[in-house]
Image: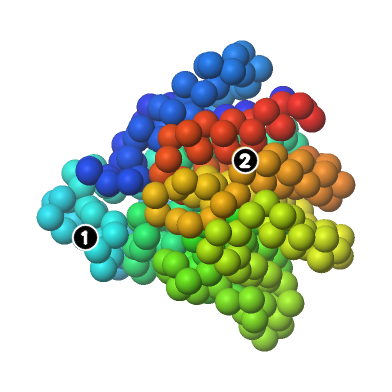
Amino acid sequence: MVYVALDERLCWYSFPDHPFNNQRYFVFKRTLEEKNLLSRLRKVTIRSATSEELLLFHSPHYLDFVKREKSERVFLDGGDTPAFKGVWEAGRIVVGTTLSCIDKAIEENTKVFTPVGGLHHAYKDKASGFCVFNDICVGINYLREKYRIKKVLYFDIDAHHGDGVYYSFAEDPDLYIVDFHQGGIFPGTGYSHEKGKGDAWGTKWNIELETGASDEDFFKELPPISKFLKNINPEFIIFQAGCDCLRGDPLTSLNLSEKVHLIVTRFLVEVAEEETKGKMVILGGGGYLAENIKRGWGRVIEELLRVS
């Protein structure tokens, strides 16, 4: 059985007059309805993360900062992530939902999708790139704290490098990262020579795609990744399935099709069945063109249901 997070409280995480807004959620829900997929999915219960859970990654000082900043005239970072009334509560819902997805995945050895998650730019003590809290980093530490799951695979196909995850765990040999992204755009990080630090060297893969990269360019990178994954034996998989890697996105310049979402989902499901007893959480990530959300996330859900 495949689970999905569908609750309009997820729409609270919506920046006014901004590419990251709640219409993305409604596009996803309508897609499920139009494809007659809702009846085949079970809903995971969403919740707010507690302050203690946020502190698994974020600093007390930063949590206090977010609580205070509620004016839309104030940015939580250098200019991409505006504060808004309710931002504290909205951010907690995103993180808490990701944690609920993790709980369900472990409880039933299954796959769980949440459309509003995968906020991979936030750091321990700062917001960045539309990301207030980093639900991925909180989730990784939650897996270790609550379930004693040590070895985690994080696989990211969002067009932007997941810098908040990579640099926060660059020295962690038990977090394996595969991150496909467009080179030369925000946040300007994730070079191919960055493979981790110290004892973690070789546990991280940054794959920079050139502007206009095609499906062929993407798929030719998969064989060495497949070889890498055969040797790591992860206990849990987190897949950030951003749709801004698809052609036509207003903030990026790749030329990929939704076949990327289909093939990567299939690929990771196979890894999950072999290594994690099927446990995987899929996070929506970025994507700012409605048609791409329909195609990309739609393909992810269809593939999960096909193999369930």
Q: Which amino acid does label 2 sit on?
A: Glu
Helix, strand or loop at disc 1?
loop
Query: Between residues 183 and 306, which one lies in front from this camera angle?
Result: 183
Q: Is residue 66 left or right of residue 161?
A: left
On-image quarter of the N terminus: top right
124 is higher (above) or lower (below) than 153 = below
Residue 165 rendering spot, x and y as whole percentages: 53, 65
Residue at x 48%, y 57% (from the top left corner): 253
271 is higher (above) or lower (below) than 164 = above
Residue 205 rendering spot, x and y as whole percentages: 68, 70
Residue 147 rendering spot, x and y as whole percentages: 67, 51
Front: mark 1 or 2: 2
Residue at x 64%, y 76% (from the top left corner): 192
Q: What residue type is labelled 1?
A: Phe
Residue at x 22%, y 43% (from the top left corner): 16
Disc 2 crowd, CA 10 A, few/some/many (<14, 14-19, 20+): many
Query: Between residues 134 and 23, which one lies in front from this camera angle?
Result: 23
Tell me if I can see residue 150 in this picture: no
Residue at x 44%, y 67% (from the top left corner): 185
Tell me if I can see residue 79 in this picture: yes
CA distance separating discs 1 and 2: 33 Å
Badge 1 vs badge 2, beta-carbon distance below 8 Å? no
Query: Between residues 193 and 202, which one lies in front from this camera angle?
Result: 193
Q: How is the image coloured?
A: rainbow
On-image quarter of the C terminus: top right
Residue 160 rendering spot, x and y as whole percentages: 49, 61
Q: In this view, does 273 lie to the left or right of 122?
A: right
Helix, strand or loop at disc 2?
loop
Does label 1 or label 2 sit earlier along the sequence?
A: 1
Q: Mark 2 points at which residue?
A: 258
Q: Is residue 43 left or right of residue 308?
A: left
Q: Mark 1 points at which residue?
A: 75
